[in-house]
Image (spheres, rainbow, N blue to C red):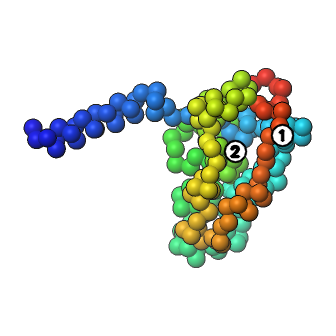
Amino acid sequence: MSKKSFTLMLVSSLVMWLGTSSFAKDYDYIGVEKCGKCHKKEKKGAQLKKWQDGPHAKAFKTLGTDSAKLVAKKAGVTGDPQKAPECLKCHVTGYGLPAARFGEKFKAENGVGCESCHGPGSAYKKKKIMKDHDKSVANGLVEITEKTCTECHNDKSPTFKDFNYEERVKDIAHPVPEGAKGGDDEEEE
């Protein structure tokens, strides 16, 4: 066996091992309804309402409009934009992943939900984890960066307009007030 073949085999084995170890754990999507249970009260930041009032909550619904159908047609999308992978990849949370990755409360119709930006919440949803930022991140909470947003807000989108991260992130900001970490006082599942 050549040195190159041996190295390739070793690397492949390592990748396979990492893929089946807990180190490479895939987290599951719980859905906006579950996130909203703890992120709805004004004194805690009213993050759910901020999302509901913003464009991301309407991302899937937007694909059903006449103007979206026209944009899709001009972009070469055939058929219904609400069923087109080219559109759904940015208009639905977790599009294309296996059904087993989504909890029973998850609804694709919720468009770009909490977990599109913050990562699947199955392992960080508990209050005792959410109270500790480092534990939340260790359990799958995504640290939002410009790259998070530009996965979809880029020139591949047929409706793309210049994207200024600093300005746009202010438009959708939904911070947790100081002293209110960990969501509402409701008991989590």
Q: Position of residue 55 (x, y in %)?
A: 75, 58
Amino acid type assigned to the residue bearing label 2 in the image? Cys
Q: Are marks 1 and 2 in contact (CB under 8 Å)?
A: no
Q: Tell me the SS state at disc 2.
A: helix
Q: Position of residue 66 (x, y in %)?
A: 71, 70
Identify which residue, 39 or 98, lies in the foreground. 39
Foreground tag (1 vs 2) = 1
Residue drawn at x 54%, y 68% is: 156
Q: Position of residue 101 (x, y in %)?
A: 55, 36
Residue matched to label 1? 177
Residue matched to label 2? 114
Q: Residues within 10 Å of mark 1 (few under 14, many from 20)?
A: few
Q: Residue furthest right?
A: 43
Amino acid type assigned to the residue bearing label 1 in the image? Pro
Residue drawn at x 49%, y 31% is: 25
Identify which residue, 145 or 34, lies in the foreground. 145
Q: CA distance from mark 1 to mark 2?
A: 18 Å
Q: Position of residue 106 (x, y in %)?
A: 67, 39
Q: Tell me the SS state at disc 1.
A: loop
In the image, residue 173 above or below residue 62: above
